[in-house]
Amino acid sequence: MGGVAWTEEEDHLLKKCIQQYGEGKWHRVPLLAGLNRCRKSCRLRWLNYLRPNIKRGNFAEEEVEMIIKLHKLLGNRWSLIAGRLPGRTANDVKNYWNCHLSKKLNALEGEDRQVSREVQVIRPQARNIGPSSGKRRGQSESPTDKGVQQESSMSSLTFDADGQNHMLETQQDNIYACLDQQGIVGELSMDFQLEGFEAMMNGEGSSSSSQWDWGDLLLDMDLYK
DNA sequence: AACTTATCCAACCGCCGCTAC
DNA sequence: AGTAGCGGCGGTTGGATAAGT
């Protein structure tokens, strides 16, 4: 592996620790669990492997379809993409993309390069609303993303003074417009959408967090319309 | 059967934004 | 205002395994 593989004993200790003390406070987990691992390793092991309801095995056709569309829309924001795929982790999605999809799509890219260039990668952010706002990272800085990120923060500034709802609506409109542009809205099967919705309602929504922040929620509301 | 190459995926690393002090 | 520490993210690495020769 990329590092030292986790043993069953370590897994057991970590599980027990999380069950006892809950998620979060990762800096304390190695000590509390008695593990000779850093906080990041513990967190990653839990999120990608030990968490309940993690789906293993091949990606379904609809999941692949979803990944492709969301990647078009969001770029390499694996955690957000994984958040729309119940039971899948950001690492899974990223690995699947790198192994299967990036090559396949690169081959096709030549055909519709013109189209993809017109699609803006959007970054749903609603930092000034909701109890968990402000915990999201600025995200990757691929050349294509940078401009949009700047635009996004500009719009935040613009609408800050007007109040939350105004900004909320504007972002929602943007997100919805982009989803619509991608043909995501209303295209996925009802079963798949419901599965995601139920997972969300059960608090299983995001692979990276047990909570949905408002930016995520907006995107979900649009996706599950 | 033995060796090489390709693929998969768990784990690590470095960076970022936020919060508390 | 500056900064240390944290959680979280995406990119990368490298060992295991499958496929090919």
Image (spheres, coloured by chain):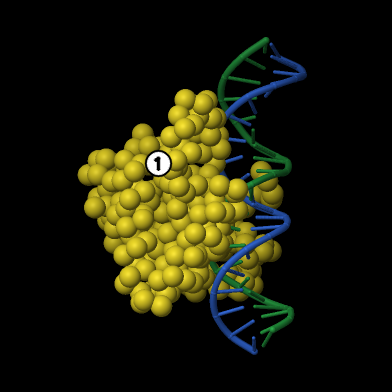
Chain colours: A yellow, B blue, C green
Q: Chain of mark 1?
A: A
From what the image shows, is residue A39 above or below residue A44? below
Q: Quadrant of residue A64?
A: top left
Q: Residue at x 42, y 59 (%)?
A: A124
- Residue A212: x and y, percent? 39, 65
Where is residue A52 drawn, in percent x and y?
A: 42, 56
Mark yes or no: residue A93 visible: yes
The percent coordinates of residue B20 (x first, y second) are: 58, 85
The secondary element bearing badge 1 is classed as helix
- Residue under circle 1? A69
* Residue A99 drawn above or below residue A149: above
On-image quarter of the N terminus of chain A: top right
What amino acid is labelled 1 in the image? Lys
Is residue A121 shown left or right of residue A193?
right
Image position of A83 (left or right of A191): right
Residue at (60% x, 48% y) in the render: A143
Closer to the camera, C12 or A149?
Answer: A149
